[in-house]
Amino acid sequence: MTSPSNVAKFRITGGKALDGEVLISGAKNAALPILLCSVLTDEEVVLKRVPDLADVKTSFHLLTELGKACSYDAATNSAVLKGGVTSKVASYDLVKTMRASIMALGPLLAYAGQAEVSLPGGCAIGARPVDLHIKGLQAMGADIQLEDGYIKAVAPNGRLQGGHVIMDKVSVTGTENLMMAAALADGVTVIENAALEPEIVDLAVCLRKMGAQISGDGTSRIEICGVKKLHGCEHSVVADRIETGTYLIAGIATHGIVSCCGANPSTLETLLTKLRQANAVVDVDGDRITADMRGRVIKPVDIITAPHPGFPTDMQAQFTVMNALAEGVSSVTETIFENRFMHIAELNRMGAHLEIKGNTVICSGVSGLKGAQVMSSDLRASASLVIAGLAAEGITIVDRIYHMDRGYEHIESKIMGLGGSIERFY
Ligand code: UD1
């Protein structure tokens, strides 16, 4: 694998135990649907704790392309969105850089009666189809054609109708897309087998502030009674549970002590249980979670990814680094996405003993990793390589860190604040 020399890389000098406090940002996966739900109103939507991330910038480009007036102050993480949409097209150039742009489809169709959103295309962590989004909108009366690589959708007479949607598979952005569409539909929509992720609940909280009538969010049956008009609101985005878990694991893998402040422990129960099984001393005090691994050995823990409240697929790669350094053998099974093991070969280049068998990785723990030159393949894979680099002896170069910039705010300053040694170079 080669990459152009001007692509940003991290140089990490490993082997130092992380020690300190890190302030957790707003969740990327909550911020993206919440930014897009502003399409449902022409009134002012004010959002706080919007993380300064590449995917958030892509969302602003998308909203601007749709005709919204957007302003963002990265220093205070506040965004203001106003005005009605004037375009109904989410172009390929934006959708290909951020698959979550598919969530423009539901709100555009509900607000403007029409939408054209590019098909996202392939993705490094598997095929990731959008059939559930399309079927759900069809159940709400949308007429949908796939033409020239675009999903072209029309709501007959300009309005979607409430519908009964049974999702064949649990889909997070699928559920969010349908919730937003149903908020402005005529009549009642019921979504069965809905996703339970905390980001769904945060979107529902924001939509209710806008006047939507939604109940059942956080359960597998969400009911939405459509209203004629939604209004502006102010909302603060929920804490990022995946960022929280990533820093806790970085602390554990380096045998240090890390406190995550501004976190939301109730969204992380499964992970915290697994961290305790791995022998970390985990303490929860309000919005502060501390994992202390000083002087302790890492115990191997089997994990199987599953929709919330199961073990999150977005924590699988990071947890694998802990298992790679554990005293004994464990297994990591991925059930959500195929092809989400691209970090395994890179971790093995750093001295890990990880073997892929179907959708399971058998982890035979080693006593230490060695710095190496490694390549990121996707967002969470890159987080695992950074954690491995921090834990390894010597220098690790992580290439293609643009993946990590999609989901981790102020990575270098947060890691350096914990005493880690990381620098960006080109
Ligand atoms: C969201 C998260 C992502 C996380 C994932 C699973 C956002 C922006 N992204 O992605 O970080 O890894 O949930 O927790 O919130 N599927 C279909 N048809 C569809 C839609 C999905 O078959 O129409 C399949 C997918 O291929 C996958 C499974 O359903 O196997 C779950 O995917 P889904 O929950 O939709 O993931 P995303 O919402 O894309």
Image (cartoon, grey):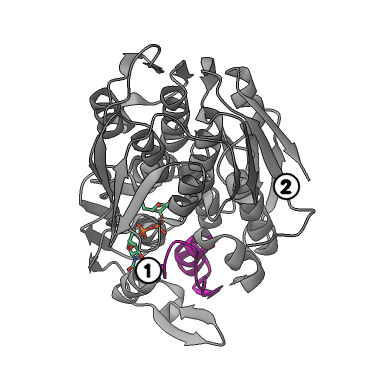
Per the image, is 108 magenta?
yes
Q: Give the residue drawn at x 36%, y 61%.
A: 174
The relative height of residue 178 versus residue 418 in the rendered view (above or below) is below
- Residue 320 vs 22, above or below: the answer is below
Is residue 359 rendered magenta in the image?
no
Where disc 1 sits, the SS reads helix
Q: Nearer the viewer, residue 211 or 403?
A: 403
**Residue 71, image x, y percentages:** 71, 43
Tell me which residue sits at (48%, 38%) in the image: 27
Q: Is residue 280 above or below residue 111?
A: above
Asked whether 341 or 61 is in front, the reply is 341
Q: Which residue is mark 2?
A: 8
Q: Amino acid at mark 2?
A: Ala
Mark 1 close to ligand 1, CB under 8 Å: yes
Q: Is residue 112 left or right of residue 226?
A: right
Q: What residue appears at the point 46 percent right and 56 percent down from the top-left corner?
A: 342
Mark 1: amino acid: His
Tell me the SS state at disc 2. loop
Q: Which residue is mark 1?
A: 133
**How far across and how far down the image is residue 314, in percent?**
40, 46
Which residues, given as a range, are shown in magenta? 101-129
